[in-house]
Amino acid sequence: MDAESTIADETPHAESETEKASVFHTRPIWHMASEVRQMTDRGQEGGERPKKLGVTWRNLTVKGISSDATFNENVLSQLSPFNKNGKGAQLKTIIEGSYGCVKPREMLLVLGRPGAGCTTLLSVLANN
């Protein structure tokens, strides 16, 4: 931790409640901050404009093949043409009617339990 930032916090002094003292807390600065600033400065000196990207989506629906359609119980069920039950690949709705906006310099946090579609949403927004 090479660099640290200092934050002033006014709290009452333990001996006298009317007297207030500044208590300083230190916390580490991100270790890559100086390198990122240098890269940005070098780019701007070279005539590069700062990049700003935002993402907006409306009525986003993602459907995928159900895990039931891709799961086979054993080797014989994979080879048997009579075990198909006449049903094609069933589509399952993973994300339905999602909307949102992430402005430049903002970060998107997606929370959900496993299988809720969090990774799918981020993959679609990243165009993967």
Image (cartoon, rainbow, N blue to C red):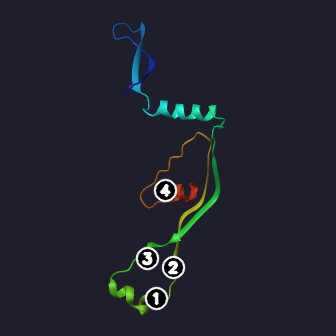
Residue type, numbered disc 4: Cys
Kindly report which numbered mark, 1 or 3, lies closer to the viewer in this rendering: 3
Pointer 2: residues within 10 angstroms few (<14), some, or many (20+)? few
Task: Give the amino acid type for the residue marked by disc 3 in the picture.
Answer: Thr
Quadrant of res 98: bottom right
For the residue labelled by badge 1, is the local secondary structure a helix, a strand or a loop? Answer: loop
Identity, as a three-letter code, of the amino acid under mark 1: Asn
Gap in Å between the C-alphas at discs 2 and 3?
8 Å
Query: How would you rate the neighbour count of disc 3 (Cα within 10 Å): few for under 14, some for 14-19, many for 20 or more?
Result: few
Residue beneath label 1, please? 85
Give the numbered dot on residue 89. 2
Pointer 2 or 4: first along the chain: 2
Cα distance in 3D space between marks 1 and 4: 32 Å
> Does label 2 or label 3 sit earlier along the sequence?
3
- Left or right of 93 on screen, residue 15: left
Q: Which residue is mark 4?
A: 118
Quadrant for the C terminus, please: bottom right
Taking 112 as reference, is 51 above or below it? above
Mark in the foreground, 1 or 2: 2
**Residue at point 40% right, 26% down?**
27
Q: Quick one: 99 or 119, which is closer to the camera?
A: 119
Tell whether label 3 touches label 4 (CB within 8 Å).
no
Category of crowding for the residue at label 1, using alpha-carbon neighbours closer than 10 angstroms: few (below 14), some (14–19), many (at least 20): few
What residue do we see at 42% from left, 32% from top? Answer: 31
What residue is shown with label 3? 70
